[in-house]
Image (cartoon, rainbow, N blue to C red):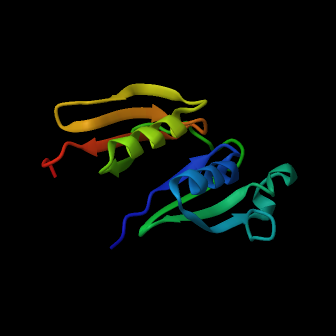
Amino acid sequence: MKLTPSLYFNGQCETAFKFYEQFLGGKVKAMLPFEGSPMAEEVPPEWRQKIMHAHLTISDQELMGSDCPPGYYQEPQGFAVALQFDDPAEAERVFDTLVDKGKVLMPLEETFWASRFGMLVDRFGIPWMINCDKVGLK
């Protein structure tokens, strides 16, 4: 079994996945719009270029996403996409990139378990946790 998070957006899926691909060093494997699919007639004409299915790989990890049809989007709550780092500088770079135009929930700082830990909501409304364990705590 494999666990693959799927993120839902309010019309920004394509922009978000291209952003994640660029700074996380991933590769978008699929970016399928509603147009040309069996779902095309279930969304308004102005929504048909929005993304029905996106698939991003980062090393051996996967992330999927889509734009919710109008009226179905709900602000994400009760979860966060967690990223784990070995290098504090890389954790800081990713945190700073994700939080740009977003919101800090907990500043990235040292904790009793981590050399860096922080929480944020990115510009697309997705919650993230960034963690870099202290040496020897794995």
Q: Residue 118, percent across and down? A: 36, 33
* Residue 28 found in image quarter: bottom right
Q: Quadrant of residue 55?
A: bottom right
Q: Residue at x 23, y 38 (%)?
A: 114
Position of residue 113 relative to residue 61, above or below, is above
Question: Is 105 displayed left or right of 131 in the figure?
Answer: right
In the displayed orientation, state which residue is furthest to the bottom.
1
Callout count? 0
Q: Is residue 79 visible?
A: no
Identify which residue, 55 or 93, lies in the foreground.
93
Q: Position of residue 94 (x, y in %)?
A: 47, 43
Please give left or right for residue 21 compared with residue 95 in the image.
right
Please state if 47 lies on the left or on the right of 69 as rendered.
right
Residue beneath the point at 39% across and 38% down: 78
Q: Looking at the picture, does residue 18 appear above or below residue 31?
A: above
Residue 116 in percent (x, y) is at 30, 36
Quarter of the figure that contains the N terminus:
bottom left
Quadrant for residue 33, please give it: bottom right
Examine the rendered structure and indicate whether residue 56 appears above or below residue 101. Answer: below
In this view, the residue in front, 121 or 42, is 121
Q: Position of residue 4 (x, y in %)?
A: 43, 63
Report if residue 105 is visible in the image: yes
Which residue is at a point 52% across and 39% down the rendered structure image?
A: 98
Q: Residue at x 38, y 26 (%)?
A: 107
